[in-house]
């Protein structure tokens, strides 16, 4: 932490709209996010808030009919900066980055590999695309990676089919595949959600281990705040296609600013709390972001919404404290920023 | 795998044994026999029947015996010496009567099968990768018309086109001069230029259904996580689709051979009648009407053999292609 952090990925005002029959679904509605070299950034939020869409947009593997606006600036190791959002999603440039410089681990270890090919075939395929065409060398790399992620008898596993491995082993193989091309950025989209708790703990430990070893940046997507506390240094909270709060992990847990984050933290089950108490939950459910009105996305569920303001104007994401940004009109800095932009009239 | 194939072969033998029973029973369901009908017919016209010949046939095939005795008198020589029996109507051994037609039926059916896949697979791939595009709608439209048009109508249409546009004699699998000629390169060529019409007519509905099955299979597979994982590796889209979702979507298509083949063989009967093709269909129909028992039984048995072996081959192919089935079978 002695050197000045340098950004690796800068997402600016990213909008992804899906034109559906019912209307336009605003999956991402202006996401702004910065990920530094070597950093682990957590992205939390409920199902459907746009976490996975953010990941898919970076990889450019979002559905083909999705309309994309904004910038995703990726600073490559070569020093070149590339706007991933402007690339042809099937072009050579993004394909050389995808799986190579940026790779991804998915939520479903059970279905992430094709059952028709061996694990080795599917891992070596990625290595041949990005690292070496040499068959012997690529096999050796795959075997080495499988051994590093803690798969016993790695060379035998290469010749096994996915259905011969347990869920935990498959997720390890998935991690091995994602790391096999030494990515600068690893996107982990709920990698432990489908695993049982003991396996989850092993995989989390493994991921921390490989990060220490390889030193890549990680974008860790989850809805599990417990995992966030163990895995990341910085957190961004997403709601309805927007980042509503971003801070260090300690700040977020001890001094949450946004009403949504506060509600989210209250609804975590805690040990020692009396069983008599009902678990708190957030009122209502996440609205479907089709034809959303202007204003803050959380207004319909917010206990402290300011009538006449929150339902009219979408608050900007503004730093309110050292390294702590929030998108909520409860904070004077946010109101001031909105006034400066001219979005809000001066009120007493 | 060897054990699996042996097991399948055993099933084939059992199925064929049962088929032979059912076939023989059903053919003999109508009252009377060919010999009786023939004798009655001759008596009605006033000319005396050759009693000695009729008696010979009756005793040779045990037509006066109960059905199970007749069955064994048919099946035993068939199994021991490949003797399919005797056609009452044509006055010649059944095998010499059906051999050529059977060969042509198998040729037309197999070429139709190849035609079905050769046309359907590229169209389905295009339609699935260009879902809701103008081309997709166009092929869906053509496909539905192909499914809905009766084969005989298509056959008539093609006969007109072939005659008017290409000047090829419509109908049949050979030009008149080659009809009874021995096999020669010229005869094979004559067969080849006559094949497109029956193949297209017989294959159209199969093509349409394979396009629909494969297209929806592919669209289903495109959504699967393993496809997204593969895309996230940086594979090219074309290679990705062929290696992952297409390979997966082929499974139901391959197992579909088993249902497509009998469909083509039986579907070709009407077409063969309309186009006047020297295939087994028309002969089968006539032999059933005339109660020419051994011709009907022989054709049905041979078609069953072809179908059952076709299904077995498609199953073995499937097991060979899909590791999941392989493991299931070996366990």
Image: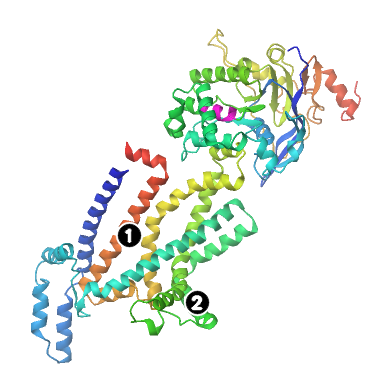
Q: For residue B60, which quarter of the picture?
A: bottom left
Q: Which residue is mark 2?
A: B157
Q: Position of residue A237 (x, y in %)?
A: 69, 23
The residue shown at (56%, 9%) is: A273
Residue A325 visible = yes
The furthest residue to the bottom: B46
Q: Position of residue A232 (x, y in %)?
A: 65, 18
In the picture shown, does residue B29 fall above or below B308? below
Q: Position of residue A179 (x, y in %)?
A: 59, 27
Query: In front here: B101 or B19?
Result: B101
Is residue B230 toward the left or the right of residue B73 in the image? right
Residue B318 in magenta stretch: no
Tell me whether marks 2 and 1 sit on the same chain.
yes
The residue shown at (60%, 39%) is: B231
N-terminal label among 2 and 1: 2
Residue range corresponding to the magenta coloring = A171-180
Alpha carbons under labels 2 and 1: distance apart: 29 Å
Q: Which mark is residue B307?
A: 1
The residue shown at (57%, 46%) is: B239
In the picture shown, does residue A161 fall above or below B186? above
């Amino acid at each position: 932490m002695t050197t000045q952090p340098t950004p690796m990925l800068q997402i600016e005002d990213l909008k992804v709209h899906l034109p559906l029959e019912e209307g336009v679904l605003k999956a991402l509605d202006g996401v702004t996010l910065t990920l530094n070299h070597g950093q682990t950034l957590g992205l939390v939020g409920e199902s459907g808030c746009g976490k996975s869409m953010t990941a898919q947009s970076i990889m450019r593997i979002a559905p083909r009919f999705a309309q994309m606006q904004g910038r995703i600036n990726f600073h490559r190791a070569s020093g070149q900066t590339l706007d991933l959002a402007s690339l042809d999603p099937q072009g050579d440039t993004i394909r050389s980055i995808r799986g190579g410089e940026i790779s991804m681990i998915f939520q479903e270890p059970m279905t992430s590999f094709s059952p028709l090919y061996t694990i080795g075939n599917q891992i070596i395929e990625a290595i041949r695309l990005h690292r070496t065409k040499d068959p012997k060398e690529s096999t050796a790399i795959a075997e080495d990676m499988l051994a590093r992620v803690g798969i016993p008898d790695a060379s035998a596993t290469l010749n096994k089919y996915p259905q011969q491995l347990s869920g935990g082993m498959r997720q390890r193989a998935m991690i091995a595949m994602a790391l096999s091309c030494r990515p600068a950025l690893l996107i982990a989209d709920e990698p432990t959600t489908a695993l049982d708790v003991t396996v989850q703990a092993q995989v989390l430990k493994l991921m921390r281990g490989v990060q220490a070893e390889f030193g890549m940046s990680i974008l860790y997507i989850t809805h599990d705040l417990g995992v966030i506390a163990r895995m990341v240094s910085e957190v961004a909270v997403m709601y309805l296609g927007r980042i509503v709060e971003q801070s260090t992990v300690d700040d977020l847990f001890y001094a949450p600013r946004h009403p949504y984050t506060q509600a989210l933290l209250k609804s975590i089950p805690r040990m020692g709390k009396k069983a008599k108490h009902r678990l708190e939950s957030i009122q209502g459910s996440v609205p479907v972001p089709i034809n959303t009105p202007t204003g803050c996305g959380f207004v319909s569920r917010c206990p402290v919404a300011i009538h006449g303001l929150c339902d009219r104007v979408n608050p900007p994401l503004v730093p309110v404290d050292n390294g702590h940004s929030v998108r909520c009109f409860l904070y004077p800095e946010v109101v001031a920023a909105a006034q400066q932009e001219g979005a809000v009239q001066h009120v007493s | 795998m060897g054990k699996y194939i042996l097991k399948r072969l055993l099933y084939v033998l059992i199925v064929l044994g049962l088929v032979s029973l059912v076939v023989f029973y059903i053919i003999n369901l109508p009252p009377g026999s060919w010999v009786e009908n023939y004798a009655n017919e001759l008596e009605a016209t006033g000319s005396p029947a050759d009693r000695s010949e009729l008696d010979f046939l009756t005793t040779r095939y045990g037509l006066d015996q109960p059905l199970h005795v007749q069955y064994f008198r048919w099946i035993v020589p068939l199994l021991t010496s490949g003797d399919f029996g005797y056609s009452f109507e044509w006055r010649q051994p059944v095998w010499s009567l059906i051999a050529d037609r059977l060969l042509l039926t198998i040729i037309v059916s197999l070429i139709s099968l190849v035609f079905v896949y050769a046309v359907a697979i590229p169209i389905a791939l295009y339609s699935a990768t260009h879902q809701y595009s103008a081309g997709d709608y166009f092929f869906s439209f053509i496909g539905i018309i192909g499914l809905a048009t009766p084969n005989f109508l298509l056959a008539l249409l093609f006969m007109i086109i072939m005659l008017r546009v290409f000047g090829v004699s419509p109908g049949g699998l050979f030009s008149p001069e080659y009809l009874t000629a021995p096999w020669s390169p010229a005869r094979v060529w004559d067969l080849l230029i006559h094949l497109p019409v029956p193949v297209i007519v017989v294959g159209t509905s199969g093509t349409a259904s394979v396009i629909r099955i494969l297209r929806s299979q592919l669209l289903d597979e495109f959504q699967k996580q393993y496809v997204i994982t593969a895309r996230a590796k940086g594979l090219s889209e074309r290679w990705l689709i062929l290696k992952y979702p297409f390979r997966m979507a082929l499974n139901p298509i391959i197992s579909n051979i088993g249902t497509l083949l009998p469909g083509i063989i039986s579907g070709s009967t009407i077409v063969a009648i309309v186009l006047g093709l020297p295939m087994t269909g028309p002969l089968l129909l006539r032999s059933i009407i005339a109660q020419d028992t051994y011709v009907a039984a022989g054709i049905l048995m041979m078609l069953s053999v072809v179908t059952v072996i076709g299904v077995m081959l498609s199953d073995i192919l499937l097991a060979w292609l899909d590791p999941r089935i392989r493991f299931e079978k070996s366990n």
